[in-house]
Amino acid sequence: MVVRVFVASSSPSVTIKKRQQDVVRFLEANKVEFEEVDITMSEEQRQWMYRNIPPENKPTQGNPLPPQIFNDDRYCGDYDCFFESKESNTVFSFLGLKPQPTSTAQP
């Protein structure tokens, strides 16, 4: 299983950049193996991300914004879902991973 975080390296939005950094920092601090996928560099990856977000999780207008998180092909959620799971200490479950008992870092 590979956690994949879809990001946009050239986003003009400060909020999107901060949210992407928050997800990546948390995964790094907790030693979760992940792959960062830059949708601004690959139209194919961007289209894959759009196609694989369940309809009930897509915004009513516009396209889903990064970061979007997957475990292999299973959609985990967006930043809001990630943040909620972080606040309730259920990130590993959110990511579809077994909890890491030695994990104590919470950036």
Image (spheres, rainbow, N blue to C red):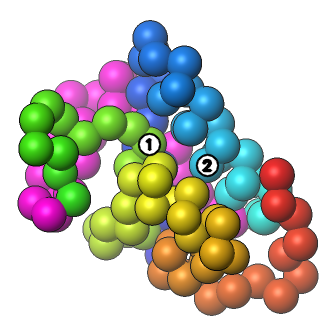
Q: CA distance from mark 2 to mark 1?
A: 8 Å
Residue 70 can be seen in this image: no
Residue 75 in the image, given as x and y percentages of width and height: 31, 66
Q: Nearer the viewer, residue 39 or 11?
A: 11
User: What residue is rendered at 48% in x and 29% in y?
Assistant: 16
Residue 72 in the image, given as x and y percentages of width and height: 38, 68
**Farthest-out residue, top:** 12
- Up the image or down, 51 lies above or below 16; here it is below
Residue 2 in the image, given as x and y percentages of width and height: 49, 67
Q: Amino acid at mark 1?
A: Pro
Q: Which residue has dot 1 on it? A: 67
Judge whether residue 50 is colored magenta.
yes
- Up the image or down, 77 lies above or below 45; here it is below
Q: Nearer the viewer, residue 83 or 100?
A: 83
Q: Nearer the viewer, residue 92 or 34?
A: 92
- Up the image or down, 102 lies above or below 23; here it is below
Q: Amino acid at mark 2?
A: Val
User: What residue is rendered at 85% in x and 75% in y?
Assistant: 103
Query: In the rendered view, does 93 fall on the left or right side of 38?
Result: right
Label 1 crowd bin: few (<14), some (14–19), many (20+), radius 10 Å: many
Would you say the residues marked 2 and 1 are in contact, meaning their CB atoms lie under 8 Å apart?
Answer: yes
Q: Magenta region: which residues?
A: 32-56
Residue 12 in the image, given as x and y percentages of width and height: 44, 11
Q: Which mark is residue 23?
A: 2
**Toward which corner of the image does residue 8 lie, by quadrant?**
top left
Q: Which mark is residue 32?
A: none
Where disc 2 sits, the SS reads: helix
Residue 27 can be seen in this image: yes
Query: In the rendered view, does 44 fall on the left or right side of 106?
Result: left
**Toward which corner of the image does residue 100 lie, by quadrant?**
bottom right
Mark earlier in primary sequence (2, 1)? 2
User: What residue is rendered at 10% in x and 60% in y?
Assistant: 55
